[in-house]
Amino acid sequence: MKKSLTAAQQKELLDVLRSRFEKNMQRHKSLKWDDVEKKVSKQADKMWSLFEMERTGGEPDVVGVDSKSGAYLFFDCCAETPKDRRSLCYDQAALDARKENKPKGSAMQMANDMGIDMMNESEYVALQKLGKFDLKTSSWLKTDDEMRKLDGAIFGDCRYGRVFIYHNGVQSYYAARGFRGVCRV
C-alpha cells in the first residue's frame, strides 16, 4: 500500500483539517492552527495516517497535546463510529479463531495498517467530554492484555446522557460497532 500523498491530497487534507479546526474551537481552545499545520506538514507518514482517518469516515480533529511527548492529539470526532471501520472483530487472533461468518477484518489490524492507535478507555471518556459521540453506534477500545488473554475486550458508547464501557468477546462483530483512532503528530 502506498503510504504517501500527492501534493493535491496534502492540500485537500490540510484544508479539511483547518476548516474542522476552525468550526470546533471548543475542542482545542489554547491551540493555533498555524502551529498545528506546521507540525503536520513536516511529517508525511502522519499526514498519510490522518488522510486514512478522514477517508474512512473518522473526521479527525486536534483535541489537545500529549503531555509526555508534546505531540498534537488527533481523535476521530465523527458523530458515530467511523462508517468504513465497522463490522470488525477486535484483533487478528480473534479473526483467525472464527471458523464461520468471518468479518472483513479486525480493528487492531486496521488501526495498525493506518498508522494510528485504537482509542483507549481514558481517551474515549475524554472525547465524550467534547461532544455527543456514539449515540447510535459503539466503538472497540484498546484493551489491557489481561482481559484480552481471557478472550475479552472493551467497547464504549453513549446512551441516556452517559458514557458506558462494556465488554464483549473479541470474536464478536456488529454492523454498528467500529473503532475510533488516535494519531499523535
Image (cartoon, rainbow, N blue to C red):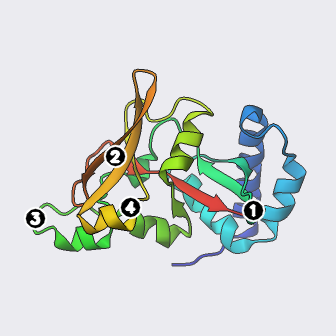
Q: Amino acid at mark 4?
A: Ala
Whether residues under marks 3 and 2 lie with C-beta atoms below 8 angstroms apart, the answer is no
Label 4 vs 3, first from the N-terminus: 3
Q: Nearer the viewer, mark 1 or mark 3?
A: 1
Q: Is residue 154 visible from the viewing direction of this image?
A: yes
User: SS for tag 4?
Assistant: helix
Whether residues under marks 4 and 3 lie with C-beta atoms below 8 angstroms apart, the answer is no
Q: Which residue is mark 4?
A: 107
Counting labels gives 4
Q: Label 4 to label 3, Cα distance in Å? A: 18 Å
Q: Which residue is mark 2?
A: 177
Q: Which residue is mark 3?
A: 100
Rendering coords of residue 178 (x, y %):
38, 50
Q: Amino acid at mark 2?
A: Arg
Label 4 vs 2, first from the N-terminus: 4
Answer above or below: position of 106 versus 64.
below
Q: Which mark is residue 6?
A: none
Q: Label 4 to label 1, Cα distance in Å? A: 23 Å
Q: Residue at x 40, y 62 (%)?
A: 144
Q: Label 1 to label 3, Cα distance in Å? A: 42 Å
Q: Amino acid at mark 1?
A: Ala
Q: Nearer the viewer, residue 135 or 170?
A: 170
Answer above or below: position of 134 versus 185.
above
Q: Residue at x 28, y 63 (%)?
A: 104
Task: Rate crowding at label 1 as few (under 14), some (14 to 19) or many (20 or more) other CA atoms within 10 Å.
Answer: some
